[in-house]
Image (cartoon, rainbow, N blue to C red):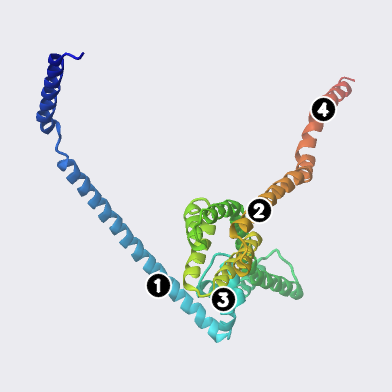
Amino acid sequence: MINLQNIIIALSTLGAFLTIVAIAIPFLQTDNRGSRLKSMAKRREDLQAQQRQKLENSQETVSLRRRATRSQGVMTDVLNKFNMTEKARSPELRLKMQQAGWRGQGPAIAYVFARLALPFIMASVVAIIIISAKNVDLGTLERMGAAAAAAGLGYLIPGIMVANKAKKRQEMMIKGFPDALDLLVICVEAGISLEQGFVRVAQELRDISPILSEEFSITTAELAYLGDRSQALTNLAQRTGAEPIKALTTSLIQSEKYGTPLGVALRVLSRENRDARMARAEQKAGSLPAALTVPMILFFLPVLFIVLIGPAVIQVLATFAEN
């Protein structure tokens, strides 16, 4: 049996310990109010600095926009004189600018103005160089041909730049598209709607693929504000111009039209994109021997011949010199 005296002693000891702890707790607690006030003051200073930085950046942005607006007004006036403003407003040209990553009317106006001005500028520069060069003896027909070639090159340069920009942009989007599609599959299979899935994918791809994140963000806004969801998806395919994204939008439109399970369609599409990326990697690996043939002939084989035949040639020359 438990001794009653031991129980009383244990309870008394516990009570004394709790009393000491209760008395000591107020003295052991530190006053964090000062540190909190310091942290709040520091946070206030940081926010003020960020606000000043935003104000300075906004002022710089406003000045840059004013300069761009002035230059755009000058280009617009020139195009109006030549009756080429409608060409800058064509939907085909605007779509081409969007695929290159340039939105708004300004890039289209600059493109048409460059195609109008660069031929004259480059032809004038070539003509001045030919006339000022003393050692160049060319006939009149040859000089006119050189000026015409420079003018044609000036006309083609804006189109080449836009096409290269659009191609690089599509390659960057295709590179990050399988990861984006996997994230979209996870979101859809988790029960998230398509709009929220695009929002989540855009947030996750902000650091991995900023271009694809921007396009998905625009699509999210269009899905929210446009009455026709298929139109928003079609706009995504047209803006990007990439074949995998076109396949995605086609699958989404068909799934919504015919009521097929969206998760199954996206999973099949994700598998196909993974296989396509692996096929592109295998194709690059298979083309390496053909690509290395010319460098090997130009750089490796001459060195190899020098190393192998060089000593024998030196011995033969030394033997002839002794004789």
Residue 288 picture location, percent across and down: 75, 44
Q: Nearer the viewer, residue 204 or 94?
A: 204
304 relative position to 280: left or right: right
Q: Nearer the viewer, residue 220 or 229?
A: 229
Instruction: Give the CA separation, mark 1 to mark 4.
Output: 68 Å
Contact between labelled residues 4 and 3, with CB atoms less than 8 Å apart: no
The quarter of the picture where residue 110 lies is bottom right
Identify the residue position indicated by label 1 in the image. Answer: 66
Disc 4 crowd rating (10 Å Cα; few below 14, some 14-19, many 20+) is few
Residue 294 picture location, percent across and down: 78, 44
| Amino acid type, mark 4 | Leu
Of the two numbered discs 1 and 4 in the rendering, the one whose residue sits closer to the viewer = 1
Ranked by sequence position, the earlier of labels 2 and 3 is 3
Contact between labelled residues 3 and 1, with CB atoms less than 8 Å apart: no
Q: Residue at x 72, y 47 (%)?
A: 284
Examine the rendered structure and indicate whether residue 278 appears above or below residue 226: above
Identify the residue position indicated by label 4 in the image. Answer: 308
Instruction: Give the CA separation, mark 2 to mark 4.
Output: 49 Å
Identify the residue position indicated by label 2 in the image. Answer: 273
| Amino acid type, mark 2 | Asn
Identify the residue position indicated by label 3 in the image. Answer: 113
Ranked by sequence position, the earlier of labels 1 and 4 is 1
Of the two numbered discs 3 and 4 in the rendering, the one whose residue sits closer to the viewer = 3
